[in-house]
Image (cartoon, helix red, strand yellow):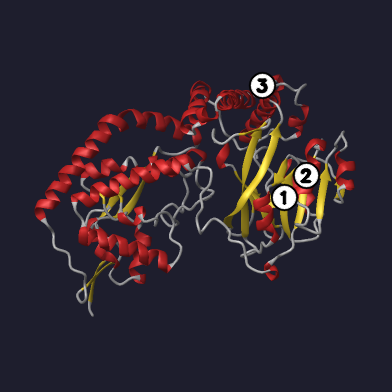
């Protein structure tokens, strides 16, 4: 078999576009269909531009600029019709970085911004590609365009991979509808994507396009309604069979004044570990006595910020694997059964658990509270907690893999509505301080627009209205949190932090306020 390769950048071709002269799948252009398909693409894209993009682009431009530094649009060279390169447009959902053209973004990729997570989940980040359709670079439906490096790699894996380039790439496609989207995970993933793309090339028709468009909207709609959990083979850890698979781990609980919750929490982890540790930092209630009565090992440690305190607590554990819990959490029965037979895949794997959040006695099922996945099970030899002032998270010199465990951690952090409001005020100040040491700035746009946007996100887009009065309270309190966060950050930016409420939250100001 012979092959022809075009490698000239001056001709606008992909770096390695392989054309086989033997056993090449055949494709015959249907000119009437191609004309009708192009007319349909232009009409639908024009409607999207007129009805949606003209008002959505300015709003998202402000939000993206507020969320992180960098351009509003992300442009990337992609491989299109007959291997021709074009600039594929997206709303920017990741921070500006040097690996954007080399490494595919994956779930929980640290490069993805907080707004970017929503844009990518809802597929709103793809809307600028309707402009690519108007320019003739793309179609509404077709094989998804790949980065140059990916096309080169995929062509080396599958001999006839470039067959998919015989039609314009699409905003949506057959492979995506069949569940093959996002980062590839091995040869079979690439192969199955190619199979469905090749099927579309051979069988494309207007009726198939209409069906794929409808299915795309249905998938997005179902995804919004099912945000509570994403059950994916790549992300949910299966229960290993047999008791021999069990790996010992330590249960490490950081507590302070948690007498109300420490008893139910320790009861919920009974039988999971022979090393249950409670690290207390200056409690004034009966938490220590209750923990000792329940058979836990108790250590009194100094409070040195969330991350450092959790690291200090983990150092007292007998096992390398740590199940890190807070005093206001409880392990439910389903998660308990998973952990009874749990075994790690690698030492660089971090296991995440979904919070079941309660406000008082009410389980909050929407308002953005149903998608709170928390890193809780990790190996202390490869993973540690960072020293962020608020919203501390894990860090590691190694590349980490993340898997989700079935079941819930019941989170009873807020006993009353007033306690919820007070803690959100405290969290706003902590977040402002964290932003300040990371040299973030607060502008009048943040103060003016952020509260309203936050309210709309919680109450409308995250379906908070379905939680009734509780959903309204959460949306309103979140809007206040957003304003207080940026107002405190403005004071810190202008060296007016001495005017913050030092009497009510003196512990917040034990941190350094100078930029790192």
Q: Secondary structure at mark 3?
A: loop
Mark 2 and mark 3 in contact? Answer it, CB < 8 Å. no
Which sits earlier in the primary sequence, circle 2 or circle 3? 2
Q: Is residue 446 above or below residue 200?
A: above
Q: Which residue corresponds to the image point at 64% horizontal and 29% vertical from the top-left?
A: 428
Provide the secondary structure element on which disc 1 rests.
strand
Which quarter of the image is occupied by the N terminus? Answer: bottom left
Tag 3: Cα neighbours inside 10 Å, few (<14), some, or many (≥20)?
Answer: few
Which of discs 2 and 3 lies nearer the camera? The answer is: 2
Between 86 and 298, which is closer to the camera in this rendering?
298
Looking at the image, residue 104 lies above or below residue 438: below
Answer few, some or many: residues within 10 Å of disc 2's Cα (few below 14, many 20 plus, some between 14 and 19): many
Q: Quarter of the image holding residue 6?
A: bottom left
Q: CA distance from mark 1 to mark 2?
A: 8 Å
Lower position in the chain sequence, tag 3 or tag 1: 1
Q: Where is mark 2, residue-wise?
A: 254
The residue wearing badge 3 is: 496
Dot placed on the residue nearer the N-terminal end, 1 or 2: 2
Residue placed under numbered mark 1 in the picture: 324
Q: Position of residue 286 (x, y in %)?
A: 88, 37
What residue do we see at 41% from left, 32% from top?
A: 60
- How far apart are the alpha carbons under marks 2 and 3? 33 Å
User: Outermost residue, left direction?
Assistant: 32
**Cα distance, mark 3 to mark 1?**
37 Å
Vertical relation: 274 (above or below) 435: below
Provide the secondary structure element on which disc 2 rests.
strand
Q: Are marks 1 and 2 in contact (CB under 8 Å)?
A: yes
Expressed as whole percent of the image width and height from the top left, the position of residue 144 reads 32, 54
Give the side of residue 403 with respect to residue 10, left or right: right
User: Quarter-wise, where is residue 29 in the image?
Assistant: bottom left
């Amino acid at each position: 078999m012979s092959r022809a390769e075009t490698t000239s950048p001056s001709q606008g071709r992909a770096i390695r576009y392989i054309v086989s002269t033997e056993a090449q799948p055949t494709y015959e252009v249907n000119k009437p269909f191609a004309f009708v398909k192009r007319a349909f693409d232009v009409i639908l894209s024009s409607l999207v531009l007129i009805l949606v993009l003209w008002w959505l682009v300015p709003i998202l431009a402000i939000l993206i600029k507020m969320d992180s530094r960098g351009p509003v649009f992300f442009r990337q060279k992609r491989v299109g019709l007959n291997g021709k390169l074009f600039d594929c447009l997206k709303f920017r959902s990741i921070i500006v970085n040097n690996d954007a053209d080399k490494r595919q973004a994956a779930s929980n990729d640290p490069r993805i911004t907080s707004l970017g997570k929503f844009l990518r989940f809802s597929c709103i980040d793809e809307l600028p590609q309707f402009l690519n359709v108007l320019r003739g670079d793309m179609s509404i439906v077709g094989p998804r365009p790949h980065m140059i490096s990916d096309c080169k790699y995929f062509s080396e894996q599958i001999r006839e991979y470039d067959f998919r380039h015989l039609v314009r790439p699409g905003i949506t496609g057959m492979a995506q509808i069949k569940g093959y989207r996002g980062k590839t995970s091995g040869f079979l993933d690439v192969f199955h994507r190619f199979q469905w793309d090749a099927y579309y090339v051979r069988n494309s028709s207007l009726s198939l396009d209409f069906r794929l468009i409808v299915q795309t909207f249905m998938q997005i709609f179902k995804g919004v309604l099912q945000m509570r959990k994403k059950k994916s083979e790549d992300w949910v850890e299966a229960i290993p069979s047999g008791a021999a698979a069990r790996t010992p781990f330590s249960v490490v609980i950081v507590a302070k004044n948690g007498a109300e919750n420490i008893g139910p929490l320790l009861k919920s982890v009974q039988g999971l570990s022979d090393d249950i540790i409670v690290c207390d930092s200056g409690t004034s209630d009966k938490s220590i006595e209750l923990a000792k009565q329940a058979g836990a090992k108790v250590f009194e440690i100094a409070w040195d910020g969330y991350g450092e305190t959790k690291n200090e607590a983990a150092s007292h554990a007998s096992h390398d694997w740590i199940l890190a819990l807070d005093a206001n959490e409880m392990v439910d029965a389903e998660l308990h059964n998973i952990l009874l037979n749990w075994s790690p895949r690698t030492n660089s794997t971090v296991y995440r658990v979904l919070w079941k959040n309660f406000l008082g006695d009410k389980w909050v099922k929407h308002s953005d509270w149903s998608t709170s996945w928390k890193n809780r099970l990790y190996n202390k030899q490869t993973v540690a907690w960072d020293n962020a002032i608020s919203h501390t998270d894990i860090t590691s010199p190694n590349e980490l893999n993340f898997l989700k465990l079935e079941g819930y951690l019941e989170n009873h952090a807020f006993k009353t509505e007033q306690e919820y409001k007070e803690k959100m005020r405290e969290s706003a100040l902590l977040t402002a301080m964290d932003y300040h040491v990371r040299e973030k700035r607060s502008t009048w746009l943040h103060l003016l627009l952020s509260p309203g946007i936050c309210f709309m996100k919680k109450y409308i887009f995250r379906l908070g209205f379905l939680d009734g009065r509780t959903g309204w309270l959460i949306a309103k309190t979140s809007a206040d949190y957003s304003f207080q966060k940026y107002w405190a950050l403005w004071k810190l930016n202008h060296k007016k932090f001495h005017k913050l409420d030092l009497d009510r939250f003196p512990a917040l100001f034990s941190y350094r306020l100078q930029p790192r």
